[in-house]
Image (spheres, grey):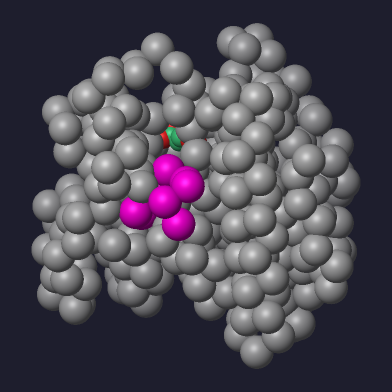
Amino acid sequence: MKLIIHGGFFSESQTNQEIKKAKQDTLAEIVKLGYKHLQTYTAVETVVYTVSLLEDCELFNAGTGSQIQSDGKIRLSASLMDGKSLRFSGVINVEDVKNPICIAEKLLGHDDRVLSGKGAKDFAREHGFGYYNPETPQRRKEYDKKLSDSIRLGTVGCVALDIYGNLAAATSTGGKGFEIPGRVSDSATTAGNYANAAAAVSCTGVGEDLVSGAVASNIVTRVTDGMPLSLATKKTFEELKTFDGFAGIIGITAKGEIYHADTHPYMVWAMCDGEVEVFE
Ligand code: ASP
């Protein structure tokens, strides 16, 4: 059993030790809770549970505390992939909900598995997900100050290998911040979140770069074809260099290789295989 999580890139001033410590402590706590869950639940159930905890944490740009888009609205995107059934489900730009990853989980059993905008919100309401405003005073303050020139990444993700040897990946985001309404994040695509029987990967970074590099699916395909995860990531990141692609990934293979990497400093992460390890 193995579990790895990320909280996106460290977007605050790198000297902000207080926020860094808060992120380290929070990720350590959440990875422990997720790992405990993995003792009794499957990889799919565990990645949903763990990402919902990350969504509920205001420190990260997913669920509560998400970035506000250019028209003043928060729109959330999240996806889930079950490496065993090869089912992918997700919601894109859904408004006024608390845990988009739980809506993605609900969609996993449906024929229509990726919903966007109003359709996603209507589906959520029909399935008992009530109104929720994910905005926090901090994000409104940032929006009001129009900090559009700073990098504001902080997507969350989780990858798990369960006791049965099955893999799953889940990713959730509030997007880039200040984007054009309707812009689609990579997080609810197979470029940002992908799993099969060989490997599972969750990404963060600039969505346009991740889609251009088909990052998650490319890494998983390379592992499927026999490459170690570290090498598959290195090769995929090489391809991003042609356009200075900005990406971070976490992943696990069926053989138990657990890995994280980023193209730029630096993604925040935590992992557990019994022992907890957190980014420095
Ligand atoms: N990948 C996300 C997006 O482009 C942002 C992030 O990872 O922080 O919407």
- Direction front: furthest residue: 18
The image shows residue 264 at horizontal and vertical percentages of 68, 22
Q: Residue 197: in sight, yes or no? A: no
In the displayed structure, 155 sits above or below 30; it is: above
Q: Quadrant of residue 38?
A: bottom right
In the displayed structure, 87 sits above or below 62; it is: below
The image shows residue 14 at horizontal and vertical percentages of 64, 25
Residue placed most toward the observer, 252 or 135: 135
Q: Quadrant of the C terminus?
A: top right
Name the side, left or right, on which 199 lies relative to 243. Answer: right
Name the side, left or right, on which 88 lies relative to 229. Answer: left
Q: Quadrant of residue 205?
A: top right
Residue placed most toward the observer, 168 or 46: 46
The image shows residue 151 at horizontal and vertical percentages of 48, 21
Residue placed most toward the observer, 141 or 37: 141
Residues shaded magenta: 57-64
Q: Does the magenta stretch mainly form a helix, a strand or a loop?
A: loop
In the displayed structure, 270 sits above or below 244; it is: below
Q: Quadrant of the N terminus?
A: bottom right
**Residue at (53, 28) in percent of width and height:** 12
Residue 37 falls within the magenta-colored stretch: no
**Residue at (80, 63) in percent of width and height:** 276
**Residue at (85, 36) in percent of width and height:** 231
Name the side, left or right, on which 83 lies relative to 100. Answer: right
